[in-house]
């Protein structure tokens, strides 16, 4: 029986471990944090329950495939409910758009501030669906590990159809003119850690994914997804080692033979690294073992944006102001990306995303309280800005911004507050320069030609947001499945 070491118990690592174990491999997962989940962790304090990490769950079929790959039913482990409406968008001029699958309702909401943009909505959504269908058929469900797969004529034809050299912003301008509409749909670039003025037009597929295919609530909180996958993995016989940091990937000649850890050596025939490929390459592999990923190439890659998080337990209710997912846009949204990617400093007036899981599920906070996860996009680390001593000041700024936007009594009712910075994210998860999504998608090259899932050493594989098919919880789950099946095909 082939032995596999999976480095990291994030969603991608759990998916890989489940599939490989179901195929007959002996799998050990080594995780440096005290619990599974990677960037997605549960935090509880003072009766408030938070999910620190991914909170907008889409594409449930990706997670369903993980369970089915082991002959199980997702419904026996996890309870997902579609949210309708999904995300609320609150603009600086006071207007509101609640994302819904009802296109007439969407047109009516957009028409409040731009009748002309409302007329273009259906045409835009038709293109959004076409882009998603192309991506789903040609990119999302296939590994691109060699020149043959990348030179597939169908893939190349599909690449041309998704306008790789057109930015998302330029595509949006073909349909819309009002700043609110451009901000609302441009924000989808941040789902892959990028700027709407630089990310390719392919990400115009995300409105179809979210508004038509749906956003889902996970009963018990998003961390229940991690718990469900971990439970399945344990049932199958996966061995977990928590609080163990891998210090090196071992090789003999050009083949992996295991990993070195702070607690000793672990032998393996195959190593799957679930984490940031750039950090893993630099920290765990000597340069001679990664000729396709030398330091100069790593340094030339632009990391994705990071995020600044505030977990706020507030003895107030905001049923009228908030849905489970609410975004408060500033007056000049485009400045946010100038600050993050060009000036490499926290935005002075950022968009603030608020996740209030207690909106959909009582019991996530004490009676009369609200568990609020606040996220502002932030620059990756190493640009000269330090969060040390600044995090509480910035947290107060975000709270005051939300109070001005209608969440009255937020500061006065605050019972619990925790902050989480890009520097902490980098320390806890080994995310390269604290980036949430690995590398950015601010260019066609970094979007469509991400680092390979296959390492330079025989038996070394990568899963996660830095590699194919990209960042985001469902795509990372697919990454794990695709890599596991490819390993099985090669019959190590």
Image (cartoon, grey):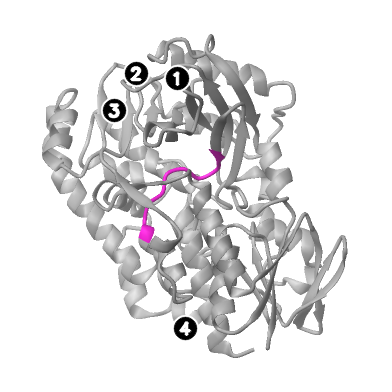
Residue 289 falls left or right of residue 158: right
**Nearer the viewer's eye, disc 4 or disc 2?**
2
Q: Tell me the CA gap for discs 2 and 3.
A: 9 Å
- Residue 459 counted in the magenta span: no
- What secondary structure is marked by label 3? helix
Q: Label 2, on which residue? A: 92
Occupied quadrant, residue 290: bottom right
Q: Label 3, on which residue? A: 180
In the image, residue 483 sits, relative to residue 400, either above or below, namely below
Q: Earlier in the sequence, mark 1 or mark 3?
A: 3
| CB-based contact (under 8 Å), mark 2 and mark 3 | no
Q: Could you say which is closer to the camera, residue 330 or residue 410?
A: 410
Q: Earlier in the sequence, mark 4 or mark 3?
A: 4
Q: Earlier in the sequence, mark 1 or mark 2?
A: 2
Give the quadrant of the N terminus: bottom right
Q: Is residue 382 at all visible to an observer of this figure? A: no
- What secondary structure is marked by label 4? helix
Q: Label 4, on which residue? A: 148
Classify mark 1: residues with Cα within 10 Å, few (<14), some (14-19) or many (20+): few
- Residue 52 counted in the magenta span: yes
In the image, residue 471 sits, relative to residue 342, either above or below, namely below
User: Magenta residues?
Assistant: 51-60
Q: Label 1, on which residue? A: 368
For image coordinates 37% across by 36% down, the residue present is 360
Picture coordinates of residue 133 (x, y %)?
27, 63
**Nearer the viewer's eye, disc 4 or disc 1?**
1
For image coordinates 17% across by 26% down, the residue present is 114
Q: Tell me the CA gap for discs 4 and 3.
A: 43 Å
- What secondary structure is marked by label 2? loop
- What secondary structure is marked by label 1? loop
Q: Tell me the CA gap for discs 4 and 1.
A: 59 Å
């Amino acid at each position: 029986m082939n032995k596999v070491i999976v480095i990291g118990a994030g969603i991608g690592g759990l998916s890989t471990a489940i599939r490989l174990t179901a195929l007959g491999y002996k799998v050990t997962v080594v995780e440096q944090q005290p619990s599974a989940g990677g960037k997605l962790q549960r935090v509880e304090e003072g009766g408030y329950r938070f999910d620190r990490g991914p909170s907008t769950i889409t594409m449930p079929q990706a997670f369903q495939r993980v369970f089915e790959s082991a002959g199980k039913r997702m419904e026996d482990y996890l309870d997902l409910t579609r949210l309708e409406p999904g995300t609320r968008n609150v603009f600086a001029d006071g207007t509101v758009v609640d994302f819904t699958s009802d296109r007439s309702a969407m047109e009516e909401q957009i028409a409040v501030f731009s009748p002309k943009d409302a007329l273009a909505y259906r045409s835009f959504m038709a293109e959004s669906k076409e882009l998603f269908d192309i991506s789903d058929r040609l990119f999302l469900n296939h590994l691109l590990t060699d020149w043959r797969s990348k030179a597939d004529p169908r893939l190349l034809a599909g690449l041309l159809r998704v306008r790789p050299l057109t930015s998302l912003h330029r595509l949006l301008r073909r349909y819309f003119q009002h700043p609110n509409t451009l901000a609302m749909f441009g924000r989808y670039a941040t789902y892959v850690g990028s700027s709407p003025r630089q990310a390719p037009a392919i990400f115009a597929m995300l409105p179809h994914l979210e508004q038509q295919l749906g956003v889902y609530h996970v009963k018990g909180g998003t961390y229940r997804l991690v718990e469900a996958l971990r439970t399945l993995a344990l049932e199958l016989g996966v061995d977990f080692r928590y609080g163990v940091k891998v210090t090196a990937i071992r090789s003999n000649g050009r083949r992996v033979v295991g990993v070195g850890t702070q607690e000793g050596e672990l032998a393996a025939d195959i190593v799957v690294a679930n984490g940031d490929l750039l950090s893993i390459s630099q920290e765990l592999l000597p340069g001679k073992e990664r000729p396709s990923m030398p330091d100069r190439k790593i340094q030339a890659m632009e990391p994705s944006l990071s995020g600044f998080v505030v977990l706020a337990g507030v003895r107030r209710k905001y049923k009228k102001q908030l849905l489970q997912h609410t975004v408060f846009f500033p007056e000049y949204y485009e400045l946010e990306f100038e600050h993050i990617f060009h000036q490499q400093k926290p935005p002075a007036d950022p968009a603030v995303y608020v996740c209030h899981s207690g909106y959909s599920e009582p019991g996530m906070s004490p009676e009369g309280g609200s568990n609020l996860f606040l996220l502002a996009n932030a620059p990756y680390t190493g640009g000269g800005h330090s969060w040390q001593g600044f995090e509480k000041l910035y947290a107060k700024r975000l709270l005051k911004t939300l109070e001005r936007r209608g969440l009255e009594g937020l500061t006065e009712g605050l019972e619990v507050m925790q902050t989480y910075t890009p520097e902490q994210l980098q320390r806890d998860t080994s995310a390269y320069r604290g980036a949430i999504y690995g590398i950015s998608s601010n260019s066609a090259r970094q979007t469509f030609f991400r680092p390979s899932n296959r390492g330079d050493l025989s038996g070394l594989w990568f899963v996660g947001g830095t590699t194919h098919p990209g960042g985001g919880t469902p795509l990372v789950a697919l990454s794990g499945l695709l890599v596991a099946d490819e390993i099985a095909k090669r019959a190590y």
